[in-house]
Each structure stands twice: as C-alpha cells, then as structure tokens.
Image: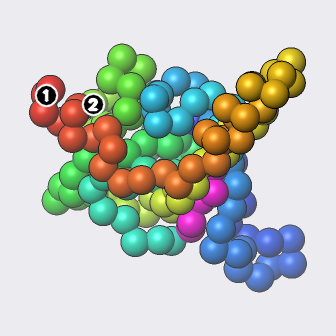
C-alpha cells in the first residue's frame, strides 16, 4: 500500500511518465519492504511477472503494489510476493485494466537510523538501489497453488 500518486501536475499539464512512491506494509516481502521508495513508470506496458502500482478495486483512493500473475478475460490477476500477507486477487478478484497505474522499475531502500558503522554503510550501499525485476517470486507462488 502506498500514498496517493498524482497523475497530473499543478498546471493542468500531464504529469511526467515517472513518479516516486513509498511502500507500507509486508505484502511484497522479500522483494519490497516497508519504507522502500519506488520509481513508478506510469502507463508502461505490463506483462505477467511485473510489479505494478494499482488502485485497490474496493477503495480506489488506496494504492497498492502487487505482482501480475496472469492475464484473465476481464483484467489482471495480481499477487503479493508474501503469500501470508493477503490483500491481493485472492481477496478481491481480477483487477480491471483501468485500475493499473504503472510498472515499478526501481526500488531504493533508505538508510536506517543509527546504522553509521563502515560495515553498515557498505552493506547499505551495495543493496540500497536495485531494479525491480519481472518474475522473481511469482513463479514460486503459482507453483504452490
């Protein structure tokens, strides 16, 4: 889940094709963690395996991050990478195309407070920024169903 992402600029012109959002909650662990920042590509082509930002089907002011499992006749079946967290298509069904906002391209993990030792800084520098790849965890979850 994430805060609202703006689709238009203040001057009425279309927003840039990219935006930043923050992850809250555990539904995409181990791919994304609470507090991660995401670079979202609005209107990008999507396919099964991609991590996307979408409007919740029942609360459209709430944005969520999920992985596309498959295309269905009426939209997309989406799953969280954490099978125990819920809040995906197993709860609310197929997500229509018009609720999908964009594809997550990149994640950035901010430095945790108090982590200032040289080893902690090195570990953070090596793992803080990564592209969000397609299909990393979805295949394991689909095989388990």
Q: Image point 83% across, 22% down: which residue?
A: 117
**Is residue 14 at least partly visible in the picture?**
yes
Q: Quadrant of residue 124?
A: top right
The color scheme shown is: rainbow
Q: Quadrant of residue 96?
A: bottom left
Residue marked by disc 2 = 90
Residue 132, percent across and down? 48, 51
| Image position of 61 with respect to 101: above or below | above
Q: Quadrant of the C terminus?
A: top left
Residue 70, percent across and down? 21, 52
Residue marked by disc 1 = 145
Could you tell me what secondary structure mostly forms the magenta stretch? strand
Q: Image point 71% across, 41% down: which residue?
A: 125
Q: Is residue 48 left or right of residue 121?
A: left
Residue 121 vs residue 107, the one in the foreground: 121
Of the numbered discs 2 and 1, the one sitting upstream in the chain is 2
Whether 15 is among the magenta residues is no
- What is the C-alpha distance between the residues marked 2 and 1? 11 Å
The magenta stretch spans which residues? 38-42
Mark 1 residue element: loop
Q: Image point 27% across, 41% down: which residue?
A: 138
Q: Residues within 10 Å of mark 2 (few under 14, many from 20)?
A: few
């Amino acid at each position: 889940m994430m805060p609202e992402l703006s689709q238009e600029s203040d001057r009425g012109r279309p927003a840039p094709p990219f935006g930043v959002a923050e992850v809250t909650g555990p539904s995409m662990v181990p791919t994304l963690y609470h507090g991660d920042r995401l670079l979202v590509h609005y209107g990008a082509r999507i396919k099964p395996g991609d991590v996307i930002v979408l409007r919740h089907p029942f609360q459209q002011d709430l944005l969520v991050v999920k992985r596309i499992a498959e295309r269905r006749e009426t939209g997309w079946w989406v799953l969280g990478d954490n099978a125990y967290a819920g809040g995906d298509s197993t709860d609310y069904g197929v997500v229509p195309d018009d609720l999908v906002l964009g594809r997550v391209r990149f994640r950035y993990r901010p430095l945790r407070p108090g982590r200032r030792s040289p080893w902690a800084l090195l570990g953070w520098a090596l793992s803080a920024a990564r592209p969000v790849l397609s299909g990393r965890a979805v295949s394991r979850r689909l095989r388990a169903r």
